[in-house]
Amino acid sequence: MKDQIIITMGREHGSGGHYIADMIARELGIKLYDKDSIESEIVSEGYSEELIRRMDEKPVNFFASRRIGRFSNSLEVNVAEKTFDMIRAKAASGESFLLIGRCGEQVLKDDPHRVSLFIGGDPHAKLCRVMEKKGLSAEEAIEEIRTVDHQRKAYHNYYCEMKWGDARAYDLTVKSDVLGMEGTAEMLIRYIRAFQEKD
């Protein structure tokens, strides 16, 4: 049985991915790293909190950025690389955790303790969830989903070989509306525990 478990999770906006991740992390008794906790650690390294929030999983300005080897004049790229290095260090330390976003399935693709998940959902179910959670009209929710997913996709695809949401990049992809969020979390917990038992 694997003593260490690392779960990486990509998700579509409105799929309930964060809620599902929280249920999984609580049940397994492991740390959940999401936008807020990642930002907090990066800020502790000396970066501006306001700047980090502006750049959170946003596309890189391709025309303004220039890379020489591992070094770039783009602050977005430097912050992303710092984030990836931090994730690798946590994995190397032996810590078990669940990571939401941040290209986790690619950053840790060679780690034998990593299981990668992607949470999607039916468009109507996602729309209803965003409308209810944010108090938005249908038109506003459609635009928010489109914008957020576009940003996540552009960020991911800039840094990763495999495309965001491509099932071939993940161990398991699921639609949260099929079993509901609780049912999806329970199914994924069983999957993760089976992965831990595997030699």
Image: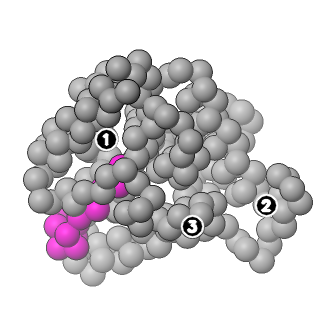
Q: Does residue 116 appear to the left or right of 29 in the view shown?
A: right
Residue name at image x 47 percent, y 65 percent: 164
* Residue assigned mark 1: 21
Q: Which mark is residue 63?
A: none
Q: Which range is magenta? A: 117-129
Residue name at image x 10 percent, y 53 percent: 179
Quadrant (top left/top right/bottom left/bottom right) for the N terminus: top left
Q: How is the image coloured?
A: one colour
* Residue assigned mark 2: 74
Which callout, 3 or 2, points at the residue further toward the start of the chain? 2
Asked if labels 2 and 1 touch by Cβ distance under 8 angstroms, the answer is: no
Q: Position of residue 150 (x, y in %)?
A: 47, 73
The amino acid at mark 3 is Asn
Q: Does residue 156 appear to the left or right of 97 in the view shown?
A: right
Q: Position of residue 66 (x, y in %)?
A: 84, 67
Q: How far apart are marks 3 and 2 (CA)?
A: 17 Å
Q: Position of residue 49 (x, y in %)?
A: 63, 44
Tell which tag, 1 or 2, sits nearer the viewer.
Answer: 1
Q: Which mark is residue 157?
A: 3
Q: Which element type, helix, strand or loop, lies under badge 1?
A: helix
Residue name at image x 24 percent, y 39 percent: 191
Instruction: Reply above or below: 113 against 57.
Output: above
Q: Residue 198 magenta-drawn? A: no
Front position in the image: 106 or 81: 106
Q: Which element type, helix, strand or loop, lies under badge 2?
A: loop
Q: Which element type, helix, strand or loop, lies under badge 3?
A: helix
Q: Does residue 96 appear to the left or right of 185 in the view shown?
A: right
Tell which tag, 3 or 2, sits nearer the viewer.
Answer: 3
Q: Does residue 158 appear to the left or right of 19 in the view shown?
A: right
Front position in the image: 120 or 133: 120
The amino acid at mark 1 is Ala
Q: Residue furthest front?
A: 199
